[in-house]
Image: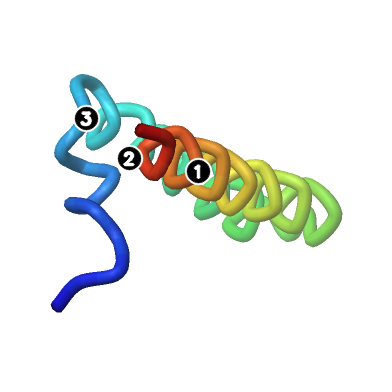
Amino acid sequence: MSLLPASTYALPDRIKSAQQEHEEIVAAIAHGDGDAAEAAARRHVANGYRIRLEMTRV
């Protein structure tokens, strides 16, 4: 039994937006900007969390 609905990737455009978020994280790391990498990673996690919460509302 699954406690959570389908992956957030089941939503339209989520794969594209998550890919962009990942690219921002990698770019910040590649430029040696730890603060920007952390901020981008936190945004990515927050976006996923927000979307997941929206998916659980029925």
Expressed as whole percent of the image width and height from the top left, the position of residue 49 reads 55, 49
Question: Quick one: SS at disc 2?
Answer: helix
Residue nearest the observer in this picture, 2 or 51: 2
> Residue at image x 63%, y 46%?
46
Do callouts 3 and 1 mark residues in contact (Cβ within 8 Å)? no
In the rendered image, the residue lying farthest to the right is 35
Q: Which residue carries the number 3 mark?
A: 11
Expressed as whole percent of the image width and height from the top left, the position of residue 4 reads 30, 61
First along the sequence among labels 2 and 1:
2
Within-10-Å neighbours for mark 3: few <14, some 14–19, many 20+:
few
Tell whether 49 sits left or right of 56.
Answer: right
Within-10-Å neighbours for mark 2: few <14, some 14–19, many 20+:
few
> Residue at image x 23%, y 36%?
15
The C terminus lies in quadrant:
top left
Q: Is residue 52 above or below residue 29?
A: above
Given this view, does label 2 or label 1 mark the residue nearer the observer? 1
Kindly identify the amino acid type of the residue bearing the numbered disc 2: Gln
Q: Which residue carries the number 2 mark?
A: 19
In the rendered image, the residue lying farthest to the top is 12
Expressed as whole percent of the image width and height from the top left, the position of residue 39 reads 77, 47
Within-10-Å neighbours for mark 1: few <14, some 14–19, many 20+:
few
In the rendered image, the residue lying farthest to the front is 58
Q: Which residue carries the number 1 mark?
A: 53
Kindly identify the amino acid type of the residue bearing the numbered disc 3: Leu
Task: Specify the quadrant of the image occupied by residue 8.
Answer: top left
First along the sequence among labels 3 and 1:
3
Q: How many marks?
A: 3
Separation of marks 3 and 1 at Cα, in angstroms:
13 Å
> Residue at image x 19%, y 21%?
12
Residue nearest the observer in this picture, 43 or 6: 6
Kindly identify the amino acid type of the residue bearing the numbered disc 1: Leu
